[in-house]
Image (tube, grey):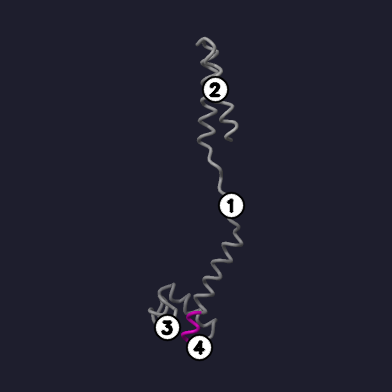
Amino acid sequence: MAEDKDKLLKQLDALKIFPNNKLVRELKNQIKTKLKKLEITKPIPPKKNPNLTRSNKLKRYHNYIRQIRNNFPNLKYNQIRKQFAKRKRGDDVSIPDAVWQNPSP
C-alpha cells in the first residue's frame, strides 16, 4: 500500500514538468482520487473465531456456576443452573442476591 502511494506521488511530481492543459489536469485528478481511495481504505481486522468466543463465554459461565456451588455444596450443579435461569427471568430463588453478585467466598 505504501509502495502504491509512493508511485502515485512520483507520478504527480512528474506531471509538474508538463504544461497545465486539459489532459494533465485529468491525469492529476485521477491520481488524486486514487490517493484518496488508498487513504480511505483501512485494513480489515481479522475476524475472530466464533468457536473461541463461544468457548470463552462458556468457560466464564461454568466458572461462575462452580463458584456458587462452592458456597452451596448441598445443591447440585444442575439445580444451581435452573435457579440462575429463574433469577434471570426475575423469579425468586433460594440463593441470596449477594451470592449471585459476588460468588467468591
SS label for mark 1 = loop
- Name the residue rendered at 53%, 32% in the picture: 37
Q: How crowded is mark 4: few (under 14 residues within 10 Å), some or many (20 or more)?
A: few
N-terminal label among 4 and 1: 1
Q: Which of 63 and 12 is in front in this view?
A: 12
Say which amino acid is labelled 3: Ile
Q: Where is residue 73 in the image (x, y as percent from the top left)?
A: 50, 88
Q: Where is residue 31 in the image (x, y as percent from the top left)?
A: 54, 24
Quadrant holding the C terminus: bottom left
**Quadrant where the N terminus is found in the figure:** top right
Comparing labels 4 and 3, the label whose residue is closer to the camera: 4
Q: Report the magenta residues as a range.
A: 67-72
| Residue that badge 4 annotates | 73
- The residue under label 1 is 47
Front residue of 24/66: it is 24
The answer to which quarter of the image holds residue 99 is: bottom left
Helix, strand or loop under label 2: helix
Q: Mark 2 points at which residue?
A: 30
Which comes before the other along the chain, label 2 or label 1? Answer: 2
Report if residue 69 lies within the magenta region.
yes
Mark 2 vs mark 3, foreground winner is 2
Does the stretch in magenta take in 9? Answer: no
Relative height, residue 34 to residue 42 (above, below): above
Structural distance between the alpha carbons of marks 4 and 2: 73 Å
In the rendered structure, which amino acid carries the disc numbered 2?
Gln
Q: Where is residue 26 in the image (x, y as percent from the top left)?
A: 53, 17
Q: In this view, does 19 lie above or below 75?
A: above
Label annotation for residue 95 = 3
Magenta segment's dominant SS is helix
Q: What secondary structure is found at the residue carrying circle 3?
A: loop
Q: Give the structural element (helix, strand or loop) at label 4.
A: loop
